[in-house]
Image (tube, grey):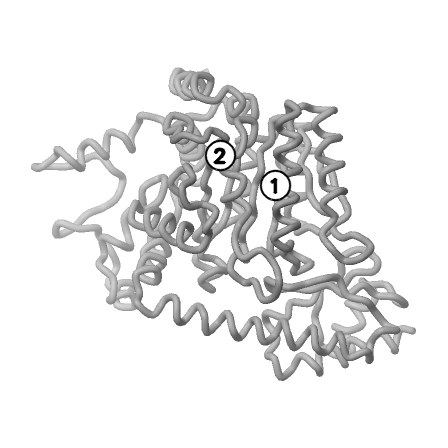
Amino acid sequence: MNPLAVELNDLLAQHNPHVLEMLSDLGKNLFFPKGILTQSAEAKEKAHKFNATIGIATENGGPMYLQCIQDKLSAFDPKDIYPYAPPAGKPELRSLWREKMLRENPSQQGKHFSNPIVTNALTHGLSIAGDMFLDKGDHLILPDMLWGNYNLTFGTCCGAVIRKYPTFTATGGYDVDAFKAELKNSAEEKGKAVVLLNFPNNPSGYTPTVAEGDALVAAIKEVAEGGCNIVAITDDAYFGLFYEDSLKESLFGKLANLHPRILAVKLDGATKEEFVWGFRTGFITFADGNSYENTPVMTALEKKAMGIIRARISNCPHPSQTFAIEALRSPNFIKQKQEKFQVLKGRALKTKEVLNSGKYDKAWDYYPFNSGYFMCLKLKTVDAEKLRVHMLDKYGVGAISIGKTDLRIAFSCIDEKDIPELFATIHQAVQDLS
């Protein structure tokens, strides 16, 4: 094992040995090298005459670039576009995102957590978390209504065993008891569990109520108190898009500093929150279970995360980080976000209005939804995949089939005025097949 990895592991062992136990074999071996990047950083401070360290080309005291590209980006200084960004992300962006998290998540106030590290969007953050905390055979606990890419990221790539529990109770609430039972089973079998909480949920579009959220946190704490190490990951991809009665913040704040055997990991990003899907700018943030500021633990986890970023992709794109900074600084940022929120809320409520009309009750039920981009129909009379293909071939309407009965509808990309026609067309397609 590299001496730098040993040094980081020693920090964890001294300040929270449970976090060291949570790491995968790869996670224990991760470190951030004191190589070219460190030497270049030192040279940036002290090399006042010539700096021949970092692998970019320079010209006229700044980065070299092609004018045909700069012409399209003339509003930005070349130094904020072309050079490599720091491996953990631009410091200003990390600081601005931290301020935003505190502003939007009251439960994080007064809690101790790391500075957000920039990732290449949220999926990259999931991959980092998998690499750091999941060995082959470790348990990942997920609801049965889940984003399919989790299977690839955690199951195929990490070798984790995905343990599913029913998402909803028979009466339509979040099935906290099923979650708790699955978590207890993993605790008994492994003594360690990784929990992934994705709210607003993809594909269901559901966020738990405050009471349900508190019950999920209480269940995690109870199992941790019983001796199980728990990595609690919050996938907050659709954060902020809360339309009706639900939590209005991430559970990360309530999980942070909760118990020494609980490590909270927050994954979020500008991708969907700021409507910049192609920018691929996300963040990973850590909070251990100590109630005091545990800087050594945060330092060790940050350096290990930076190590896997350095190993896999070197660093994240610079231009998109600069664009995100400009947005977060803008005096119009909050107002414009609220305007887009109202558009999406209108689409969600119109969808619910159409579904509650009673016209389609013989064809389908629908799963609870109150947030995010999606909702799911539960078909009563036809196969979901056959319906999907028929809708596409005959009516030019696309949707996603999930299993035999479930059809995911992204109301986020349908104008409010078109939503009644969309469901009328889906119903007609059901009748065709029936």
Height in image: 46 above or below 283?
above
Q: Which residue is nearer to you in this view: 138 or 316?
A: 138
Height in image: 182 above or below 213?
above
Measured as percent of width and height from the top left, residue 112 is found at 41, 37
For label 2, the residue is: 257
User: Label 1: few (<14), some or many (≥20) within 10 Å?
Assistant: some
Height in image: 76 above or below 183?
below
Q: Say if residue 84 shows up in the picture.
A: no
Q: Which mark is residue 217?
A: 1
Dot 1 falls on a residue whose secondary structure is: helix
User: Label 2: few (<14), some or many (≥20) within 10 Å?
Assistant: many
Q: Which mark is residue 242?
A: none
Identity of the amino acid at label 2? Asn
Q: Which residue is nearer to you in this view: 89 or 419?
A: 419
**Residue at 24% in and 56% down:** 65
Task: Give the Cα distance between marks 1 and 2.
Answer: 12 Å
**Please, which residue is most extreme toward the right here?**
434
Q: Say if residue 70 shows up in the picture.
A: yes
**Along the polypeptide, which appears first: circle 1 or circle 2?**
1
